[in-house]
């Protein structure tokens, strides 16, 4: 499903993540490899796939002191874990840029708390584990 997200990318679509997201992905994959839930070769392939996909990223949001302050303030409004607050602060920064350019933001995640916070802030979400996700992605792209 994520392959479709990247492979079907339209020229006007901007992809973004934070540098924290890159670190979090590598950490999660490394934990799976250490627990032998994925083979070492799978770990290397997944990291290589992400490196290829990340070349499509239009924005890589830095994590700095100001973003951390923004993430801390978010915790007063939304019941998020610390890492998700950092992700959400990054999302809100991207949303500000997108609004100035009159572009739409779609957050891709399977984290229910993060998706709920996004929806409360009026941000469109896409959960790749949702049964209707592919139809949602197609409708979103057809409606662009």
Image (cartoon, rainbow, N blue to C red):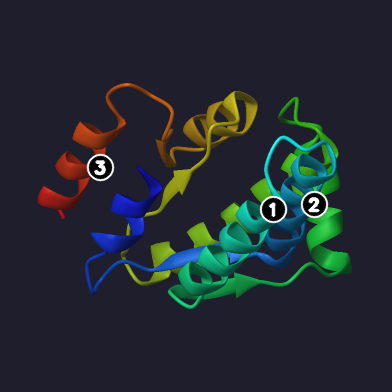
**Do labels 1 and 3 touch, CB within 8 Å?**
no
Q: Residue at 27% of width from left, 24% of height from top?
A: 132
Q: Position of residue 21 (x, y in %)?
A: 69, 56
Q: Quadrant of the C terminus?
A: bottom left
How far is disc 3 from disc 2 in space, using C-alphas? 28 Å
Q: Is residue 93 visible?
A: no
Residue situated in front as seen by the camera: 47 or 92: 47
- At horizontal 38% and vertical 24% (from top left) the residue drawn is 130
Identify which residue, 110 or 115, lies in the foreground. Answer: 110
Tally the numbered discs: 3
Q: Earlier in the sequence, mark 3 or mark 2?
A: 2
Rendered position, 31 above or below 6: above
Vertical relation: 59 (above or below) 4:
below
Q: Position of residue 27 (x, y in %)?
A: 80, 52
- Find numbered disc 3 in the image and state the secondary structure of the residue it sits on: helix
Task: Return the residue at label 2.
Answer: 27
Quadrant position of residue 91: bottom right
* Residue, disc 3: 137
**Decide: marks 2, 1 in contact (CB < 8 A)?**
yes
Q: Residue at x 89, y 67 (%)?
A: 65
């Amino acid at each position: 499903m994520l392959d479709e997200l990247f492979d079907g990318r339209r020229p006007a679509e901007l992809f973004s993540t934070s540098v924290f997201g890159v670190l979090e992905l590598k950490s999660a994959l490394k934990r799976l490899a250490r627990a032998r839930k994925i083979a070492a070769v799978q770990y290397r392939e997944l990291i290589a796939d992400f490196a290829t996909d990340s070349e499509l990223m239009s924005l890589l949001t830095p994590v700095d002191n100001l973003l951390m302050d923004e993430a801390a303030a978010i915790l007063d409004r939304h019941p998020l874990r610390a890492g998700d607050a950092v992700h959400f602060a990054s999302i809100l920064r991207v949303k500000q840029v997108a609004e100035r350019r009159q572009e739409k933001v779609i957050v891709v995640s399977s984290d229910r708390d993060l998706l709920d916070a996004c929806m409360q802030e009026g941000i469109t979400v896409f959960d790749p584990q949702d049964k209707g996700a592919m139809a949602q992605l197609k409708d979103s792209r057809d409606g662009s």
